[in-house]
Amino acid sequence: MGNGLSLSVAVLFFTRVLGLSAAQLGLGMTAAGLCGVAASVPAGRAADRWGARRVLVVLVSVQAVGTAGYALVHSYPAFVALACLVSGVDRGSAAVRNALYAEVLPADRRVAGRAHLRVVTNIGICLGTGLGAIALQADSRPVYLTAILADAVSFVAVAVLFHCLVVPPRPWVTGTSVPGTVPGTPASESSGNTGVVNTSDPSDKGVKQGRRRNPALRDGPFVAVTVLNALLCLQFAVLEVGVPLWIVQETAAPRITVAGTLIVNTLLVITLQVRATRGTEERAGAARACGRAGVVLAASCLVISLAHGLPAIAAAAVVLGGVALQSLGEVSAQAGAWALSYDLAGERDHGAYQGVFNAGTAAALMAGPALVSTLVIGYGAVGWVALGAVLAAAGLAMRPAVRWAGRRDAIRTAS
Protein backbone atom coordinates (compact mmCIF):
# COMPACT_ATOMS: atom_id res chain seq x y z
CA MET A 1 0.00 0.00 0.00
CA GLY A 2 2.82 2.35 0.84
CA ASN A 3 4.53 1.69 -2.48
CA GLY A 4 1.30 2.20 -4.40
CA LEU A 5 0.77 5.51 -2.64
CA SER A 6 4.31 6.78 -3.23
CA LEU A 7 4.49 5.60 -6.86
CA SER A 8 1.34 7.57 -7.60
CA VAL A 9 2.66 10.86 -6.27
CA ALA A 10 6.46 10.53 -6.54
CA VAL A 11 6.98 12.23 -9.91
CA LEU A 12 4.80 15.23 -9.07
CA PHE A 13 6.30 15.45 -5.58
CA PHE A 14 9.83 15.56 -6.97
CA THR A 15 9.01 18.05 -9.73
CA ARG A 16 6.37 20.29 -8.13
CA VAL A 17 7.41 20.22 -4.48
CA LEU A 18 11.18 19.70 -4.70
CA GLY A 19 11.39 21.71 -7.92
CA LEU A 20 13.43 19.21 -9.95
CA SER A 21 13.43 19.33 -13.74
CA ALA A 22 12.60 16.24 -15.78
CA ALA A 23 16.28 15.91 -16.75
CA GLN A 24 17.43 16.17 -13.14
CA LEU A 25 14.87 13.61 -12.04
CA GLY A 26 15.87 11.19 -14.79
CA LEU A 27 19.58 11.49 -14.01
CA GLY A 28 19.00 11.10 -10.30
CA MET A 29 16.83 8.03 -10.72
CA THR A 30 19.39 6.47 -13.07
CA ALA A 31 22.09 6.91 -10.44
CA ALA A 32 19.73 5.47 -7.87
CA GLY A 33 19.06 2.47 -10.12
CA LEU A 34 22.78 1.76 -10.38
CA CYS A 35 23.04 1.82 -6.59
CA GLY A 36 20.14 -0.61 -6.42
CA VAL A 37 21.92 -3.06 -8.73
CA ALA A 38 25.13 -2.78 -6.72
CA ALA A 39 23.41 -3.28 -3.35
CA SER A 40 21.67 -6.57 -4.11
CA VAL A 41 24.71 -8.87 -3.95
CA PRO A 42 26.22 -7.62 -0.64
CA ALA A 43 22.76 -7.54 0.95
CA GLY A 44 22.23 -11.18 0.04
CA ARG A 45 25.61 -12.14 1.46
CA ALA A 46 24.78 -10.26 4.66
CA ALA A 47 21.57 -12.30 4.96
CA ASP A 48 23.58 -15.53 4.80
CA ARG A 49 25.97 -14.32 7.45
CA TRP A 50 23.68 -12.63 9.98
CA GLY A 51 20.26 -14.05 9.13
CA ALA A 52 17.71 -12.72 6.65
CA ARG A 53 15.23 -11.45 9.24
CA ARG A 54 17.82 -9.45 11.17
CA VAL A 55 19.25 -7.85 8.02
CA LEU A 56 15.79 -7.17 6.64
CA VAL A 57 14.67 -5.32 9.76
CA VAL A 58 17.72 -3.06 9.48
CA LEU A 59 17.25 -2.38 5.75
CA VAL A 60 13.52 -1.66 6.02
CA SER A 61 14.15 0.66 8.98
CA VAL A 62 16.76 2.56 6.96
CA GLN A 63 14.27 2.76 4.09
CA ALA A 64 11.72 4.31 6.44
CA VAL A 65 14.19 6.99 7.52
CA GLY A 66 15.35 7.62 3.95
CA THR A 67 11.82 7.94 2.60
CA ALA A 68 10.91 10.41 5.35
CA GLY A 69 14.10 12.30 4.53
CA TYR A 70 12.67 13.39 1.17
CA ALA A 71 10.55 15.89 3.13
CA LEU A 72 13.75 17.62 4.25
CA VAL A 73 15.55 17.76 0.90
CA HIS A 74 16.33 21.26 -0.39
CA SER A 75 19.15 20.68 -2.90
CA TYR A 76 19.77 18.49 -5.91
CA PRO A 77 22.93 16.78 -4.53
CA ALA A 78 21.00 15.88 -1.38
CA PHE A 79 18.19 14.43 -3.49
CA VAL A 80 20.59 12.27 -5.52
CA ALA A 81 22.36 11.01 -2.40
CA LEU A 82 19.09 10.18 -0.69
CA ALA A 83 17.63 8.55 -3.80
CA CYS A 84 20.73 6.34 -4.06
CA LEU A 85 20.38 5.35 -0.41
CA VAL A 86 16.67 4.55 -0.71
CA SER A 87 17.14 2.61 -3.94
CA GLY A 88 20.07 0.68 -2.50
CA VAL A 89 18.21 -0.47 0.60
CA ASP A 90 15.06 -1.13 -1.45
CA ARG A 91 16.80 -3.50 -3.88
CA GLY A 92 18.86 -4.98 -1.06
CA SER A 93 15.76 -5.67 1.00
CA ALA A 94 14.10 -7.30 -2.03
CA ALA A 95 16.98 -9.77 -2.27
CA VAL A 96 16.90 -10.45 1.47
CA ARG A 97 13.12 -10.92 1.44
CA ASN A 98 13.52 -13.59 -1.22
CA ALA A 99 16.09 -15.32 0.98
CA LEU A 100 13.76 -15.03 3.97
CA TYR A 101 11.02 -16.81 2.02
CA ALA A 102 13.41 -19.73 1.62
CA GLU A 103 13.92 -19.81 5.40
CA VAL A 104 10.28 -19.63 6.48
CA LEU A 105 8.60 -21.62 3.69
CA PRO A 106 9.05 -25.37 3.05
CA ALA A 107 10.97 -26.10 -0.14
CA ASP A 108 7.89 -27.48 -1.89
CA ARG A 109 5.81 -24.40 -1.02
CA ARG A 110 8.20 -21.57 -1.83
CA VAL A 111 7.00 -20.84 -5.35
CA ALA A 112 3.33 -21.09 -4.42
CA GLY A 113 4.05 -18.90 -1.41
CA ARG A 114 5.71 -16.30 -3.63
CA ALA A 115 2.66 -16.38 -5.88
CA HIS A 116 0.27 -15.72 -3.00
CA LEU A 117 2.51 -12.92 -1.78
CA ARG A 118 2.55 -11.36 -5.24
CA VAL A 119 -1.24 -11.43 -5.39
CA VAL A 120 -1.48 -9.70 -2.01
CA THR A 121 1.16 -7.19 -3.11
CA ASN A 122 -0.84 -6.27 -6.21
CA ILE A 123 -3.97 -5.81 -4.15
CA GLY A 124 -2.06 -3.57 -1.74
CA ILE A 125 -0.61 -1.52 -4.59
CA CYS A 126 -4.12 -1.03 -5.99
CA LEU A 127 -5.35 0.25 -2.64
CA GLY A 128 -2.33 2.52 -2.28
CA THR A 129 -2.80 3.85 -5.81
CA GLY A 130 -6.39 4.74 -4.92
CA LEU A 131 -5.12 6.80 -1.99
CA GLY A 132 -2.54 8.35 -4.29
CA ALA A 133 -5.29 9.41 -6.69
CA ILE A 134 -6.88 11.39 -3.87
CA ALA A 135 -3.56 13.10 -3.19
CA LEU A 136 -3.13 13.92 -6.88
CA GLN A 137 -6.58 15.45 -6.99
CA ALA A 138 -5.78 17.68 -3.99
CA ASP A 139 -2.45 18.66 -5.66
CA SER A 140 -0.92 20.60 -2.77
CA ARG A 141 2.42 20.55 -1.01
CA PRO A 142 1.03 19.48 2.40
CA VAL A 143 -0.87 16.57 0.81
CA TYR A 144 2.18 15.37 -1.14
CA LEU A 145 4.32 15.57 2.01
CA THR A 146 1.68 13.62 3.93
CA ALA A 147 1.70 10.90 1.27
CA ILE A 148 5.50 10.56 1.40
CA LEU A 149 5.50 10.45 5.21
CA ALA A 150 2.68 7.87 5.16
CA ASP A 151 4.87 5.70 2.94
CA ALA A 152 7.69 6.06 5.50
CA VAL A 153 5.34 4.99 8.28
CA SER A 154 4.38 1.91 6.27
CA PHE A 155 8.03 0.83 6.29
CA VAL A 156 8.14 1.23 10.08
CA ALA A 157 5.10 -1.05 10.38
CA VAL A 158 6.70 -3.63 8.10
CA ALA A 159 9.97 -3.55 10.09
CA VAL A 160 8.00 -4.29 13.27
CA LEU A 161 6.17 -7.19 11.59
CA PHE A 162 9.43 -8.69 10.33
CA HIS A 163 10.93 -8.34 13.81
CA CYS A 164 8.00 -10.33 15.25
CA LEU A 165 8.22 -13.04 12.59
CA VAL A 166 9.24 -16.45 13.90
CA VAL A 167 11.97 -17.94 11.70
CA PRO A 168 12.57 -21.70 12.07
CA PRO A 169 16.14 -23.03 12.28
CA ARG A 170 17.75 -23.31 8.89
CA PRO A 171 18.43 -26.79 7.43
CA TRP A 172 22.17 -26.66 8.02
CA VAL A 173 21.85 -25.94 11.76
CA THR A 174 24.03 -28.28 13.84
CA GLY A 175 24.78 -28.52 17.49
CA THR A 176 28.55 -29.06 17.62
CA SER A 177 29.79 -29.62 14.06
CA VAL A 178 31.83 -26.46 14.03
CA PRO A 179 33.82 -25.23 17.01
CA GLY A 180 32.67 -21.87 18.22
CA THR A 181 29.06 -22.19 17.09
CA VAL A 182 26.19 -21.93 19.53
CA PRO A 183 24.05 -25.10 19.61
CA GLY A 184 20.68 -24.50 18.02
CA THR A 185 21.74 -21.43 16.03
CA PRO A 186 22.74 -21.17 12.37
CA ALA A 187 26.48 -21.37 12.01
CA SER A 188 26.40 -18.24 9.88
CA GLU A 189 25.05 -16.29 12.85
CA SER A 190 27.74 -17.45 15.30
CA SER A 191 30.83 -15.36 15.83
CA GLY A 192 33.99 -16.58 14.18
CA ASN A 193 32.39 -18.86 11.60
CA THR A 194 30.59 -18.43 8.31
CA GLY A 195 29.05 -21.89 8.10
CA VAL A 196 29.31 -25.64 8.45
CA VAL A 197 31.14 -27.36 5.63
CA ASN A 198 28.87 -29.81 3.85
CA THR A 199 30.81 -31.54 1.12
CA SER A 200 27.63 -32.88 -0.47
CA ASP A 201 26.49 -29.32 -1.20
CA PRO A 202 28.30 -27.82 -4.22
CA SER A 203 28.05 -24.37 -2.70
CA ASP A 204 30.27 -25.47 0.18
CA LYS A 205 33.30 -26.14 -2.01
CA GLY A 206 34.38 -22.53 -1.66
CA VAL A 207 34.76 -22.70 2.12
CA LYS A 208 38.32 -21.88 3.00
CA GLN A 209 39.63 -20.82 6.37
CA GLY A 210 36.18 -19.70 7.55
CA ARG A 211 35.60 -17.39 4.60
CA ARG A 212 33.89 -18.12 1.29
CA ARG A 213 33.71 -16.40 -2.02
CA ASN A 214 30.23 -15.75 -3.38
CA PRO A 215 29.08 -19.19 -4.62
CA ALA A 216 26.38 -17.74 -6.88
CA LEU A 217 28.87 -15.73 -8.93
CA ARG A 218 30.91 -18.91 -9.52
CA ASP A 219 27.86 -20.95 -10.55
CA GLY A 220 27.82 -20.78 -14.36
CA PRO A 221 24.33 -22.22 -14.93
CA PHE A 222 22.84 -19.97 -12.27
CA VAL A 223 24.46 -16.87 -13.75
CA ALA A 224 23.11 -17.87 -17.16
CA VAL A 225 19.59 -18.25 -15.74
CA THR A 226 19.98 -14.88 -14.01
CA VAL A 227 20.89 -13.15 -17.28
CA LEU A 228 18.05 -14.84 -19.17
CA ASN A 229 15.58 -13.85 -16.47
CA ALA A 230 16.85 -10.27 -16.64
CA LEU A 231 16.03 -10.24 -20.36
CA LEU A 232 12.56 -11.60 -19.63
CA CYS A 233 12.12 -8.82 -17.07
CA LEU A 234 12.19 -6.30 -19.92
CA GLN A 235 8.48 -7.14 -20.09
CA PHE A 236 7.88 -4.80 -17.15
CA ALA A 237 9.29 -1.87 -19.10
CA VAL A 238 7.00 -2.84 -21.97
CA LEU A 239 3.95 -2.40 -19.77
CA GLU A 240 5.12 0.60 -17.81
CA VAL A 241 6.87 2.59 -20.57
CA GLY A 242 6.57 1.04 -24.02
CA VAL A 243 2.81 0.58 -24.13
CA PRO A 244 1.90 4.05 -22.77
CA LEU A 245 4.28 5.75 -25.21
CA TRP A 246 2.98 3.62 -28.09
CA ILE A 247 -0.64 4.45 -27.25
CA VAL A 248 -0.09 8.18 -26.93
CA GLN A 249 2.39 8.76 -29.76
CA GLU A 250 1.77 6.06 -32.36
CA THR A 251 -1.89 5.01 -32.17
CA ALA A 252 -5.33 6.61 -32.31
CA ALA A 253 -6.45 4.82 -29.14
CA PRO A 254 -7.93 7.08 -26.42
CA ARG A 255 -5.42 8.04 -23.74
CA ILE A 256 -7.60 6.41 -21.10
CA THR A 257 -6.46 3.13 -22.65
CA VAL A 258 -3.22 3.57 -20.68
CA ALA A 259 -5.15 3.18 -17.43
CA GLY A 260 -7.06 0.27 -18.97
CA THR A 261 -3.85 -1.62 -19.67
CA LEU A 262 -2.79 -1.34 -16.02
CA ILE A 263 -6.20 -2.54 -14.86
CA VAL A 264 -6.14 -5.53 -17.22
CA ASN A 265 -2.63 -6.48 -16.12
CA THR A 266 -3.35 -6.15 -12.42
CA LEU A 267 -6.57 -8.15 -12.56
CA LEU A 268 -4.98 -10.96 -14.56
CA VAL A 269 -1.96 -11.15 -12.27
CA ILE A 270 -4.20 -11.31 -9.20
CA THR A 271 -6.36 -13.98 -10.83
CA LEU A 272 -3.73 -16.17 -12.47
CA GLN A 273 -0.43 -15.89 -10.58
CA VAL A 274 -1.08 -18.71 -8.11
CA ARG A 275 -2.40 -20.99 -10.85
CA ALA A 276 0.67 -20.28 -12.97
CA THR A 277 2.93 -21.95 -10.40
CA ARG A 278 1.45 -25.38 -11.12
CA GLY A 279 3.95 -27.62 -12.85
CA THR A 280 6.99 -25.58 -11.78
CA GLU A 281 7.91 -27.90 -8.91
CA GLU A 282 10.66 -29.51 -10.98
CA ARG A 283 13.45 -27.74 -12.85
CA ALA A 284 12.29 -28.98 -16.23
CA GLY A 285 8.76 -27.75 -15.61
CA ALA A 286 10.01 -24.35 -14.47
CA ALA A 287 12.18 -24.05 -17.58
CA ARG A 288 9.23 -24.96 -19.80
CA ALA A 289 7.15 -22.27 -18.05
CA CYS A 290 9.82 -19.68 -18.91
CA GLY A 291 9.94 -20.92 -22.50
CA ARG A 292 6.16 -20.58 -22.87
CA ALA A 293 6.36 -17.16 -21.28
CA GLY A 294 8.96 -15.97 -23.78
CA VAL A 295 6.85 -17.07 -26.73
CA VAL A 296 3.68 -15.50 -25.31
CA LEU A 297 5.51 -12.26 -24.53
CA ALA A 298 6.82 -12.16 -28.10
CA ALA A 299 3.28 -12.67 -29.38
CA SER A 300 2.08 -9.80 -27.19
CA CYS A 301 4.69 -7.48 -28.75
CA LEU A 302 3.50 -8.42 -32.24
CA VAL A 303 -0.15 -7.84 -31.32
CA ILE A 304 0.55 -4.45 -29.73
CA SER A 305 2.49 -3.36 -32.82
CA LEU A 306 -0.63 -3.97 -34.96
CA ALA A 307 -2.49 -1.12 -33.24
CA HIS A 308 -0.64 1.46 -35.34
CA GLY A 309 -2.88 2.92 -38.05
CA LEU A 310 -6.14 1.40 -36.74
CA PRO A 311 -9.25 3.42 -35.79
CA ALA A 312 -9.45 4.49 -32.15
CA ILE A 313 -11.70 1.74 -30.79
CA ALA A 314 -9.97 -1.01 -32.77
CA ALA A 315 -6.55 0.25 -31.68
CA ALA A 316 -7.61 0.24 -28.03
CA ALA A 317 -8.99 -3.30 -28.34
CA VAL A 318 -5.80 -4.56 -29.99
CA VAL A 319 -3.57 -2.97 -27.34
CA LEU A 320 -5.67 -4.38 -24.51
CA GLY A 321 -5.51 -7.81 -26.16
CA GLY A 322 -1.74 -7.53 -26.40
CA VAL A 323 -1.50 -6.53 -22.74
CA ALA A 324 -3.65 -9.53 -21.80
CA LEU A 325 -1.12 -11.76 -23.56
CA GLN A 326 1.70 -9.92 -21.82
CA SER A 327 0.06 -10.60 -18.46
CA LEU A 328 -0.21 -14.32 -19.24
CA GLY A 329 3.46 -14.39 -20.12
CA GLU A 330 4.32 -12.38 -17.01
CA VAL A 331 2.75 -14.77 -14.49
CA SER A 332 4.33 -17.79 -16.20
CA ALA A 333 7.76 -16.16 -16.36
CA GLN A 334 7.65 -15.15 -12.71
CA ALA A 335 6.59 -18.62 -11.55
CA GLY A 336 9.33 -20.33 -13.55
CA ALA A 337 12.01 -17.85 -12.49
CA TRP A 338 11.15 -18.12 -8.79
CA ALA A 339 11.34 -21.91 -8.97
CA LEU A 340 14.71 -21.89 -10.71
CA SER A 341 16.20 -19.24 -8.43
CA TYR A 342 15.52 -21.45 -5.42
CA ASP A 343 16.11 -24.87 -6.98
CA LEU A 344 19.53 -23.98 -8.39
CA ALA A 345 20.70 -22.46 -5.10
CA GLY A 346 22.43 -24.41 -2.37
CA GLU A 347 20.27 -24.51 0.76
CA ARG A 348 22.91 -22.71 2.78
CA ASP A 349 23.36 -19.81 0.41
CA HIS A 350 19.95 -18.46 -0.49
CA GLY A 351 21.05 -14.94 0.42
CA ALA A 352 23.99 -15.04 -1.98
CA TYR A 353 21.95 -16.60 -4.78
CA GLN A 354 18.95 -14.31 -4.34
CA GLY A 355 21.27 -11.32 -4.17
CA VAL A 356 22.78 -12.15 -7.56
CA PHE A 357 19.39 -13.05 -9.05
CA ASN A 358 17.86 -9.82 -7.78
CA ALA A 359 20.79 -7.83 -9.16
CA GLY A 360 19.93 -9.12 -12.63
CA THR A 361 16.31 -8.12 -12.18
CA ALA A 362 17.31 -4.69 -10.88
CA ALA A 363 19.58 -4.16 -13.88
CA ALA A 364 16.70 -4.95 -16.23
CA LEU A 365 14.36 -2.60 -14.38
CA MET A 366 16.97 0.16 -14.62
CA ALA A 367 17.94 -0.26 -18.28
CA GLY A 368 14.57 -1.48 -19.55
CA PRO A 369 12.71 1.85 -19.88
CA ALA A 370 15.41 3.45 -22.05
CA LEU A 371 15.87 0.32 -24.18
CA VAL A 372 12.16 -0.31 -24.73
CA SER A 373 11.29 3.31 -25.43
CA THR A 374 14.13 3.54 -27.96
CA LEU A 375 12.99 0.42 -29.77
CA VAL A 376 9.24 1.01 -29.89
CA ILE A 377 9.32 4.73 -30.56
CA GLY A 378 12.47 4.88 -32.67
CA TYR A 379 11.79 1.84 -34.86
CA GLY A 380 8.04 1.23 -34.59
CA ALA A 381 6.81 -2.21 -35.66
CA VAL A 382 10.36 -3.38 -36.41
CA GLY A 383 11.34 -2.46 -32.87
CA TRP A 384 8.43 -4.46 -31.45
CA VAL A 385 9.47 -7.47 -33.52
CA ALA A 386 13.07 -7.18 -32.32
CA LEU A 387 11.95 -6.88 -28.72
CA GLY A 388 9.68 -9.90 -29.10
CA ALA A 389 12.54 -11.91 -30.56
CA VAL A 390 14.74 -11.10 -27.55
CA LEU A 391 11.99 -12.16 -25.12
CA ALA A 392 11.29 -15.40 -27.00
CA ALA A 393 14.98 -16.29 -27.22
CA ALA A 394 15.51 -15.62 -23.50
CA GLY A 395 12.58 -17.82 -22.53
CA LEU A 396 13.49 -20.70 -24.83
CA ALA A 397 17.13 -20.61 -23.73
CA MET A 398 16.12 -21.48 -20.16
CA ARG A 399 15.86 -25.20 -20.96
CA PRO A 400 19.48 -25.52 -22.20
CA ALA A 401 20.66 -23.55 -19.16
CA VAL A 402 18.78 -25.90 -16.82
CA ARG A 403 20.16 -28.96 -18.62
CA TRP A 404 23.63 -27.47 -18.13
CA ALA A 405 22.90 -27.26 -14.40
CA GLY A 406 21.78 -30.90 -14.41
CA ARG A 407 24.98 -32.06 -16.07
CA ARG A 408 27.02 -30.00 -13.62
CA ASP A 409 25.22 -31.55 -10.64
CA ALA A 410 25.62 -35.07 -12.06
CA ILE A 411 29.39 -34.58 -12.44
CA ARG A 412 29.74 -33.21 -8.90
CA THR A 413 27.67 -36.06 -7.45
CA ALA A 414 29.79 -38.63 -9.30
CA SER A 415 32.99 -37.06 -8.03
Image (tube, helix red, strand yellow):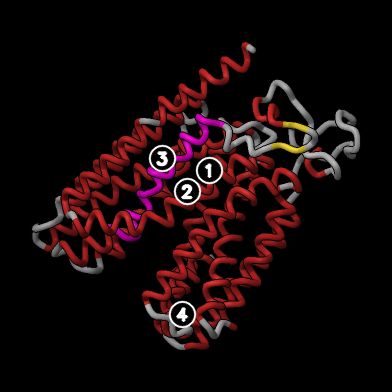
- Residue where numbered disc 3 is placed: 333
On screen, residue 9 versus residue 158, left or right, reads: left
Q: State the CA–CA distance, disc 4 to disc 3.
A: 33 Å
Instruction: Decide if residue 409 is in sight here.
Output: yes
Q: State the CA–CA distance, disc 1 to disc 3.
A: 14 Å
Please report the residue visible at 52 percent of the width from the left and 33 percent of the height from the top: 222
The C terminus: image quadrant: top right
**Residue 228 in magenta?**
yes
Q: Circle 4 sits in a helix, a strand or a loop, which is it?
A: helix
On screen, residue 220 versus residue 318, left or right, reads: right
Q: Which amino acid does label 4 sit on?
A: Phe
Q: State the CA–CA distance, disc 4 to disc 2.
A: 26 Å
Q: Which amino acid does label 1 sit on?
A: Phe
User: Picture coordinates of residue 409 (x, y %)?
Assistant: 57, 20
Check if mark 4's residue and mark 3's residue have beta carbons within 8 Å. no
**Quarter-wise, where is residue 366 in the image?**
bottom left
Q: Earlier in the sequence, mark 4 or mark 1?
A: 4
Q: Earlier in the sequence, mark 4 or mark 2?
A: 4
Q: In this view, does 153 lie above or below 307?
A: below
Circle on res. 361 = 2
- Residue where numbered disc 1 is placed: 357
Q: Circle 3 sits in a helix, a strand or a loop, which is it?
A: helix
Please report the residue visible at 61 percent of the width from the left and 68 percent of the height from the top: 154
Please report the residue visible at 48 percent of the width from the left and 62 percent of the height from the top: 125
**Residue 239 in magenta?**
yes
User: Outermost residue, front direction?
Assistant: 209
Q: Which amino acid does label 2 sit on?
A: Thr
- Neighbours of disc 1 within 10 Å: few (<14), some (14-19), many (20+): many
Circle on res. 13 = 4
